[in-house]
């Protein structure tokens, strides 16, 4: 009850505390309004200056035909088939099936060998070790070859970086890559398109939408950098720490979604947090300035807009809007939803006022 009452009181007065308010002197009397004292830190005064002096670089949304051709060729690449060949040696671009034995030197100088049977390797793939493709070129089915691969010191796989590994490879099969013709039949195979031109039109439409979105994001990034530079006061440390925490949590969540255990990575988390500091400070400064602009321009978020945002979040997380709202009210989080919508509307306001160059 108290978090919700605090949230409503702060919103009614247009106050956004830096951190969670400290609640004390709670008085509950039958038949009387709930009374309590909330102590909190607020942000220092900020002057957003003249909005019209903001200048954003005009970005063209025109899409080059070459981009459409590249996307179509990408679809073509993904639709390629592989036919077995027996009358020639391995060539660049082939998919090769081989038995592979790898011997590396362990930390104590001992030889460590691992074997993998029927491994498929596509020659020319970026993930192949340096020099690996060259060693396989010219080999034939049934041929066996031993060769060394010298991994550079900056190789991304740390346990291989700066080492020399001996490979023993036996070719079992060679398959050549066959690309489909770029024609109407290809368009029908790819999707519900009668002609290649229809497919080309859909690809162009999707790319134009993507380009517009990327340009909009670039404009917003430019605007955020400019307005952050107008905030000359020190950022409250609690706000900065909270933003850094949020960025670290988002990164950890993405690792987990990729089925990567954050605790088993070689990440120095203290260094990682420190690397977020500058970007986090910029984000906090821009948010503070957006809040000041919204206050001056009387830009608000309506209850209906908050309901829509809660409903969208509920749909994404597989919960009901009622459950999401109840959780937000319990934790005093509705204010953050209001603030997010208000800042988005303020961003659109500043984008409309900024000049173009």
Image (cartoon, grey):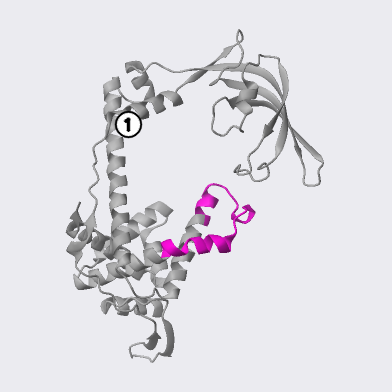
Q: At 47% from the left edge and 70% from the top edge, which residue is drawn?
A: 241
User: Residue 329: x and y, percent?
Assistant: 38, 71
Q: Residues within 10 Å of mark 1 (few under 14, many from 20)?
A: some
User: Residue 207: x and y, percent?
Assistant: 31, 36
Q: At 67% from the left edge and 18% from the top edge, which residue is drawn?
A: 172
Q: Is residue 181 left or right of residue 295?
A: right
> On the rendered image, what quadrant is the N terminus found in?
bottom left
Between 326 and 350, the one lying in front of the other is 350
State whether residue 233 is above or below residue 110. below
Q: Is residue 15 left or right of residue 126?
A: left
Q: Quadrant of residue 92?
A: top right
Between 15 and 238, the one lying in front of the other is 238
Q: Which residues are magenta?
A: 252-280
Task: Tell me if residue 318 can be seen.
Answer: no
Q: Quadrant of residue 61?
A: top left
State whether residue 231 is above or below residue 122. below
Residue 256 lies in magenta, yes or no? yes
Task: Tell me if residue 182 can be seen.
Answer: yes
Q: Is residue 247 left or right of residue 95?
A: left
Instruction: Name the outermost residue toward the top.
Output: 87
Secondary structure at badge 1 equals: helix
Which residue is label 1 attached to? 67
User: Residue 109: x and y, percent?
Assistant: 81, 43
Residue 55 lies in magenta, yes or no? no
Between 39 and 46, the one lying in front of the other is 46
Between 191 and 150, the one lying in front of the other is 150
State whether residue 118 is above or below residue 316. above
Main SS, magenta region, reads helix
Q: At 19% from the left edge and 68% from the top edge, which residue is drawn?
A: 50
Q: At 30% from the left edge and 23% from the top edge, which residue is drawn?
A: 193
């Amino acid at each position: 009850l108290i978090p919700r009452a605090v949230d409503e009181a702060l919103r009614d007065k247009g106050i956004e505390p830096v951190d969670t308010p400290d609640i004390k002197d709670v008085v509950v009397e039958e038949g009387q309004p709930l009374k309590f004292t909330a102590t909190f830190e607020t942000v220092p005064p900020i002057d957003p200056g003249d909005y019209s002096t903001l200048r954003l670089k005009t970005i063209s949304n025109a899409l080059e035909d070459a981009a459409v051709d590249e996307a179509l060729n990408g679809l073509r690449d993904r639709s390629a088939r592989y036919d077995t060949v027996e009358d020639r040696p391995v060539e660049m671009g082939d998919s090769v099936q081989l038995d592979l034995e790898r011997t590396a030197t362990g930390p104590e100088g001992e030889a460590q060998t691992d074997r993998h049977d029927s491994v498929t390797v596509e020659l020319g793939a970026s993930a192949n070790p340096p020099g690996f493709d060259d060693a396989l070129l010219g080999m034939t089915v049934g041929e066996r070859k031993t060769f060394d691969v010298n991994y550079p010191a900056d190789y991304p796989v740390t346990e291989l970086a700066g080492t020399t590994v001996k490979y023993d490879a036996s070719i079992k099969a060679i398959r050549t890559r066959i690309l489909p013709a770029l024609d109407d039949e290809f368009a029908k195979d790819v999707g519900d398109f009668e002609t290649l031109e229809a497919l080309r039109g859909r690809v162009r439409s999707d790319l134009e939408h993507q380009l517009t979105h990327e340009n909009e994001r670039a404009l917003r990034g430019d605007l955020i950098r400019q307005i952050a530079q107008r905030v000359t006061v020190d950022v409250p440390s609690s706000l900065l720490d909270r933003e850094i925490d949020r960025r670290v949590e988002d990164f950890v969540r993405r690792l987990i979604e990729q089925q990567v255990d954050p605790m088993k990575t070689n990440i120095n988390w203290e260094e990682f947090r420190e690397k977020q500091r500058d970007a986090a400070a910029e984000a906090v400064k821009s948010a503070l300035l957006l809040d000041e602009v919204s206050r001056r321009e009387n830009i608000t978020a309506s209850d209906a807009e908050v309901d829509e945002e809660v409903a969208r979040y509920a749909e994404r997380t597989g919960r009901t809007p009622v459950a999401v709202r109840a959780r937000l009210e319990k934790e005093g989080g509705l204010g953050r939803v209001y603030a997010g919508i208000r800042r988005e509307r303020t961003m659109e306001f500043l984008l409309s006022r900024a000049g173009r160059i």
